[in-house]
Image (cartoon, coloured by chain):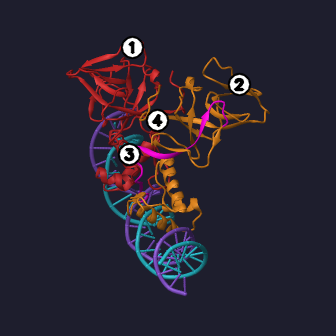
Chain colours: A red, B orange, C cyan, D purple
Amino acid sequence: MTQELTEIQRKILEFLIDEIKGNGIPPTLAEIAVHFGYKNRATVQQHLGAIERKGYIKKNPKLSRGIKLTLEEKFFVPRPVLGEVAAGNPLTIYPDAIDTIELPTIAKMPKDSFLLRVKGDSLKDAHIFSGDIIIVNPNLEPKNGQIVVAILDDAAVVKRFYKKKNQIELVSENPEFEPIVIERNYSSFNIVGIVVGVYRSMERKKAG
Amino acid sequence: MTQELTEIQRKILEFLIDEIKGNGIPPTLAEIAVHFGYKNRATVQQHLGAIERKGYIKKNPKLSRGIKLTLEEKFFVPRPVLGEVAAGNPLTIYPDAIDTIELPTIAKMPKDSFLLRVKGDSLKDAHIFSGDIIIVNPNLEPKNGQIVVAILDDAAVVKRFYKKKNQIELVSENPEFEPIVIERNYSSFNIVGIVVGVYRSMERKKAG
DNA sequence: ATCTTTACCATACATATGTATGGTATCGAA
DNA sequence: TTCGATACCATACATATGTATGGTAAAGAT
């Protein structure tokens, strides 16, 4: 359904996503033209036409700012999972890790939260299931018992946080998984944020 | 900072929120006028002016659809919770909200849908737990396998919906519970709506 | 060598859009 | 009774906006 975009079309699509997510409203042709240095709206018009023909957006004719993204979930774009960046932190995710997550590609993250999609069932005992979207706040101090997203040795984990005397314990709800113990001075450990909410859309099929 | 809105202004603000959340883009003055039956954009213009003076929105002058919500932290919108469902108990939907929650803006909240708070653990096998907020859309035709809110003999049930030849089956995920079978012509059965999403805030108590 | 695709430009046009201004009616407070 | 706030209407206007159409240039395919 979605053909390949040319380089320029891809950049324009990215700009559209940025604007729609960051600014709230889709740009006008003129605004796009200004951003890319085009002297003419018609240039943009034709690019948008191509992008629409290839199925990435839907234009509402005669309607100002009538550009809609056809992209899945509006917040996630299919991307390779390895070597992506979330909220400024380098985050490498092993496809075989217990907790793998799919990252939102939106460049402009809201300041105080971002989203991650959960894959795998290691959190099911915390009532979080594969396919759920978790809302992560990177600006909160983790408290005992809260669920945190953390980077440990370049792998992402989502687990309950417990601070002990000289170490931090990351506990899975699932008794099958042993708690991970991190010594205080361990360097390649980083808390990305605290899970403040869970959202699940029922519109698709359930994750198996 | 935010003064009281008049009744009409409040309704317009609600419409703005609905449009921005549901449609993706803020409406134009003309669209608002049409929706409220005004013959003139100037009327809307003056209402918006009042709403802006009272601090609820921010208008980007000279910009089409340049209405921004000031409430919204970009991530959460206050939404009324209309009632509670506990499987087995009669469902009361109060015209005035029993509560207000901060719903993440990613949560798809189709027009006319409403929120209910779940009580009890009868849905835990559908991955819905006590305290969760479900988003219910009353205007969709239920499809097989979808989770619906229904009223059966004055009691509320939230179960998976399956339509058979001459009957409807309501199935619990939990094999302990027998499916409920409703004959086609049974009168005291009503589908309230389809559960399109689930949201859980982690900020208060943790799930036990 | 011709054709298609991509990537731009310019001009023209209807109308969508926000704004300014002035008017009428109702209601409650001063 | 007068005044201000609220809630509407009408008209006028500049320009923002999407669209239609035609043209140029480069790169690659056939």
Check disc 1 and report its element: helix, strand or loop. Answer: loop
Near mark 2 (Cα within 10 A), the count class, few <14, some 14-19 or many ≥20, is: some
Q: Which residue is mark 4?
A: A72
N-term mark: 4 or 1: 4
Nearer the camera: disc 4 or disc 2: 2
Q: Which residue is mark 2?
A: B180
Question: Which sits in the foreground, B44 or B25?
Answer: B44
Residue B10 location in percent, x, y?
Answer: 51, 58
Image mark 1: chain: A
- Looking at the picture, which amino acid does disc 3 mark? Leu
Q: Which residue is mark 1?
A: A177
Q: Quadrant of residue A117?
A: top left
Nearer the camera: disc 3 or disc 1: 1
Nearer the camera: disc 4 or disc 1: 1
* Residue A16, numbered circle: 3
* Residue B77 magenta: yes
Q: Which residues are magenta?
A: B64-90
Q: Quadrant of residue A21?
A: top left
Check disc 2 and report its element: helix, strand or loop. Answer: strand
Image mark 2: chain: B
Which residue shows up at 35% across the image and 54% down it? A31
3 and 4 marks in contact (CB < 8 Å): no
Same-chain check, marks 3 and 1: yes
Question: Which sits in the foreground, D6 or B15?
Answer: D6
Q: Is residue A183 above or below residue A62?
A: above
